[in-house]
Image (cartoon, rainbow, N blue to C red):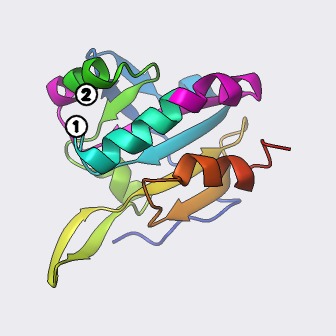
């Protein structure tokens, strides 16, 4: 597993396909503040809750200069279904081989019901306009995470 990233580190660049199959590059967001959130699986209850929280906060986030990108190991077709089911209004990106999750140290050992396995670690990163991380959060909770992120970014004051 890669070493965890921290504020001040350069954000690893990537190119991934979104739910429509269009290639999206992190470099396309240079000059903007970008929230990258890694989630384990589309169309699961916790991931739907988190995605809907981002959807419902998108306009206030954009008003403060933030864009949102969701990244999971799901294939494009699963992301397209998830976008439609939840009426999501921001890009979801497919990282099937989890190379991007590896680069962000968001793929690693997890434990569930006494079982240890490799999987996606729910994580959130904020990339500043120059491409540097201003925030790196690992093992975040799906429920309440967007509200906590807004507090951490001092967006509710």
Numbered disc 2: secondary structure: helix
> Which x, y percent locates residue 157?
86, 44
**Separation of residues labelled 1 and 2 (CA atoms):** 6 Å
Identify the disc placed on residue 99. none
- Circles 1 and 2, Cβ within 8 Å, touching? The answer is yes
In the figure, is residue 101 to the left or right of 76? Answer: right
- Residue 11 shows up from this direction: no
Please state which of residues 7 and 155 is positioned toward the viewer in this rendering.
155
- Disc number placed over residue 82 in the picture, else none: 2
State yes or no: residue 72 in magenta. Answer: yes
Residue found at x 41% / y 37% = 51
Residue 36: image location, x then y, percent? 51, 42
Q: Tell me, yes or no, if residue 92 can be seen here.
A: yes
How crowded pointer 2 is (Cα within 10 Å; few <14, some 14-19, many 20+) is rated as many
Q: Position of residue 138 (x, y in %)?
A: 48, 65
Instruction: Residue 43: give its label.
Output: 1
Locate residue 94, reporting x and y percent.
Answer: 27, 34
* Magenta-colored stretch includes residue 52: no
* Residues in magenta, as a range: 56-78
What residue lies at 71% left-to-right and 41% top-to-bottom?
128
Viewer-closest of 34 and 39:
39
**Image quarter (top left, top right, bottom left or bottom right) of the N terminus:** bottom left
């Amino acid at each position: 597993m890669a070493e965890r990233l921290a504020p001040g580190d350069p954000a690893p660049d990537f190119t991934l396909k979104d739910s429509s199959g269009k290639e999206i590059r992190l470099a396309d967001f240079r000059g903007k503040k970008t929230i990258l959130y890694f989630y384990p699986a589309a169309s699961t209850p916790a991931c739907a809750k988190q995605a809907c929280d981002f959807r419902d906060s998108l306009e206030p986030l954009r008003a403060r200069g933030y864009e949102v990108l969701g990244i999971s190991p799901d294939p494009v077709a699963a992301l397209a279904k998830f976008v439609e089911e939840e009426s999501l209004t921001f890009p979801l990106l497919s990282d099937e081989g989890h190379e991007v999750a590896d680069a962000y140290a968001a793929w690693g050992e997890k434990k569930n019901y006494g079982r240890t396995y490799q999987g996606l670690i729910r994580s959130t990163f904020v990339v500043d306009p120059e491409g540097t991380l201003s925030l790196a959060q690992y093992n975040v909770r799906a429920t309440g995470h967007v509200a906590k992120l807004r507090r951490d970014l001092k967006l509710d004051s």
